Amino acid sequence: MRVEESVEINRPPEEVFSYVANPENMPQWSTLVLEIREETEGQPRQGYRFTAAAKFLGRRFEMPFEVTAHEKSQRYSHRSTGGPFPTEWTLTLEETAGGTRLTENAQGEPGGFFRLVGPLLERAGRRQMRTDLNTLKDLLEVQG
């Protein structure tokens, strides 16, 4: 499964990166994420670990993650290290005339229950991602 969506945010890349590269902010803009528990102390960086409690397609589950890329104002990525849905999420930022183009890409191989709903999973994931990116846009533009 691979899902990719983009959004234009009228904020500088540094501000967008600072917000999206902090896992603790995820529950504020992603309706999928219920809560985040830090497993590593300090600021997010490559190798930083956290666990996300999430709900998708009516199922609640927990997934541990590790940050795999933390390139200031350019790219942030984390991949699951367990859970029912091995996934890597990558956020790429590009400066635009009006602010930042943020592209979110998720790639994964569903297991268990999620494997059974494969075709539905990609459509639901795309819709979820589009909604979350629009929420993120609204949050960041209001803060500015």
Image: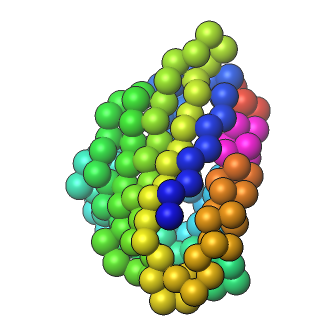
Please determine whether, in this image, residue 10 is positioned above or below residue 87. Answer: above
Give the residue drawn at x 43%, y 71%: 109
Residue 130 pos. (x, y %): 70, 49
Look at the magenta stretch and give its main secondary structure.
helix
Residue 93 image offset from top left, x and y in percent: 48, 30
Query: In the image shown, does 106 or 15 lie closer to the viewer?
Result: 106
Q: Is residue 90 magenta?
A: no
Q: Which residues are magenta?
A: 133-138
Report the front residue among 1 and 58: 1
Does 121 sit left or right of 138 as displayed? left
Q: Nearer the viewer, residue 25 or 113?
A: 113
Does 13 sit above or below residue 86? above
Task: Check the image and report above or below for 137 versus 41.
Answer: above
The picture places residue 63, in percent across and down from the top left corner, at 43, 75
For the question of whether residue 75 can be seen, the reply is yes
Looking at the rendered image, the quarter that the C terminus falls into is top right
**From this viewpoint, is residue 140 visible?**
no
Q: Quadrant of residue 38?
A: bottom left
Please identify the residue farthest to the left as the structure is shown.
47
Name which residue lies at 37% across and 68% down.
Answer: 80
* Rendering colour mode: rainbow
Instruction: Give the x, y percent position of residue 42.
Output: 30, 52
Compared to residue 68, the image places residue 54 above or below, namely below
Drawn side of residue 69 relative to residue 83, left or right: left
Name the residue at 47% across, 42% down.
91
Q: Residue at x 56, y 47 (%)?
A: 4
Which of the 4 image quarters holds residue 143? top right
Query: In this view, which residue lies farthest toward the top?
Result: 97
